[in-house]
Amino acid sequence: MSLGRAFEFLISRGHRLDDLLEGYTIDQFFLFLRSADKNVKDDRLDLATRVRIAFHATGKDWQKYMAQFMPPKILTPEKARDLQRMMGHGR
């Protein structure tokens, strides 16, 4: 990989040009480059897994899979009080 491509790659993964030019040691630069490459590979594996699940999941399996990406349900004040009582607080 050329130096220009390495810079572009790290910038695309969230590093700032100023940090690449002046903030990182050469060891840090190569460490971040290896880590970013691994992260991209992990992202691709994750995407491939999700696509496979999407094509084969139906009905409740699909709903269960998608539920993990939904924001958590908001804890109502009543449920918060119940939890506090169960934990021995707020008697």
Image (cartoon, grey):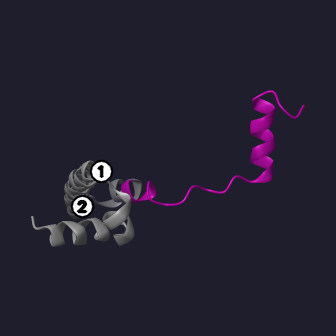
Numbered range of the magenta stretch: 65-91
Q: Which quarter of the rendering shows the N terminus?
A: bottom left
Q: Regarding mark 2 in the picture, which secondary structure is present there? A: helix
Residue toward you, 11 or 90: 11
Residue underneath mark 1 = 28
Residue underneath mark 2 = 47
Q: Is residue 68 above or below residue 81?
A: below
Label drawn at residue 84: none
- Write down the quadrant of residue 81 in the picture: top right
Is 79 left, or right, of 8 in this rendering?
A: right
Q: Position of residue 88 (x, y in %)?
A: 81, 27
Q: Residue at x 66, y 57 (%)?
A: 74
Q: Which residue is drawn at 20% across and 56% down?
A: 37
Which amino acid, mark 1? Gln
Between disc 1 and disc 2, whose residue precedes? Answer: 1
78 is within the stretch colored magenta:
yes
Q: Where is residue 25 in the image (x, y as percent from the top left)?
A: 30, 53
Q: Position of residue 29 (x, y in %)?
A: 26, 55
